Image: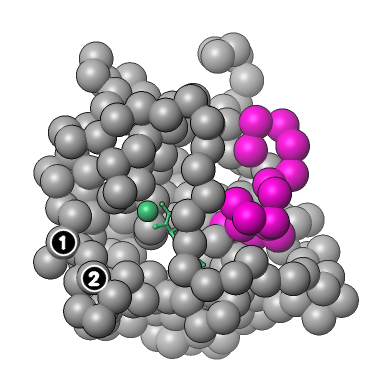
Amino acid sequence: MNESDSTIISPDTKRDERIPPGQVQTKKWPVLHYGSTPSFDRTCWTFHIFGLVETPWHCSYDEFTALPKIKVFADMHCVTRWSTLDNLWEGVSTHEVLSKVKVAATAKYVMVHCEHGFTTNLPLADFLDDDCLFAWKQNGVNLDADHGYPLRLVIPRLYAWKSAKWVRGIELMADDKAGFWEEWDHGGYHMRGDPWHDERFR
Ligand SMILES: Nc1nc2c(c(=O)[nH]1)N[C@H]1C(S)=C(S)[C@@H](COP(=O)(O)O)O[C@H]1N2
Ligand SMILES: [Mo]
């Protein structure tokens, strides 16, 4: 990495042992999701922020991708035990996106809403870590649709199911609520999902 550029380095990439317990490094990048890969129509795509905010906000794809951009160097850990290292993500920080609204003091959790009704929940504090972003590029090129183009969330410090693909909005909540994989019917994945503490299931 060139230390002089403005790339944010995810702190987990600086660990002596970068592979969390029970994980195995893979060099290729697997595709993993429930259901089919959605199609993208730039003219009717919208992104929404709603729930516990003073005034809900929404924007078009062109407006979203015109926001100030960052790069993040990070690793990725799937609960099915593969990990990929050295991903350079490009997009808009979660912090930047959330600055578009006034979040209520009571908001403590985020529900991420995606195409086809997929959801995932996480604490607001984890969502706002400074290595978290909404990305459409990885390692210099646009993501494949299978990997989440036109927009995916990247939360490097939690298991990758929190890094939701095909994101269309976020909801601010006072209380935690299970998303898709977190529901008992879909496996009961952990409400937080810290790979360094083996938080795979609830
Ligand atoms: N919309 C959506 N996003 C999703 C999923 C999903 O089922 N639907 N699966 C998650 C899981 S379990 C993982 S490991 C990562 C995988 O991302 P990749 O397919 O780009 O490797 O996407 C996450 N994002
Ligand atoms: Mo996963």
Quarter containing the N terminus: top right
User: What residue appears at the point 68 percent right and 47 percent down from the top-left corner?
Assistant: 143
Residue 78 visible, this angle:
yes
The residue to which callout 2 is attached is 187
Asked whether the beta carbons under mark 1 and mark 2 sit within 8 Å of each other, the answer is yes
Horizontal and vertical percent for residue 87? 53, 31
Horizontal and vertical percent for residue 22? 18, 36
**Label placed on residue 201:** 1
- Element type where label 2 sits in the image: loop
Magenta range: 138-152
Residue nearest the observer in this picture, 177 or 148? 148
Q: Could you tell me how far apart the alpha carbons at marks 1 and 2 are, in whole angstroms?
A: 8 Å
Residue 95 visible, this angle:
no
Horizontal and vertical percent for residue 115? 59, 76
- Element type where label 1 sits in the image: loop
Magenta segment: does it hold 79? no
- Say which amino acid is labelled 1: Phe
- 79 displayed left or right of 119: left
- 5 displayed left or right of 105: right
- Say which amino acid is labelled 2: Gly
Looking at marks 1 and 2 on the same chain, the residue that comes earlier in the sequence is marked by 2
Mark 1 or 2, which is nearer the eye? Answer: 2
Magenta segment: does it hold 149? yes
Horizontal and vertical percent for residue 187? 23, 70
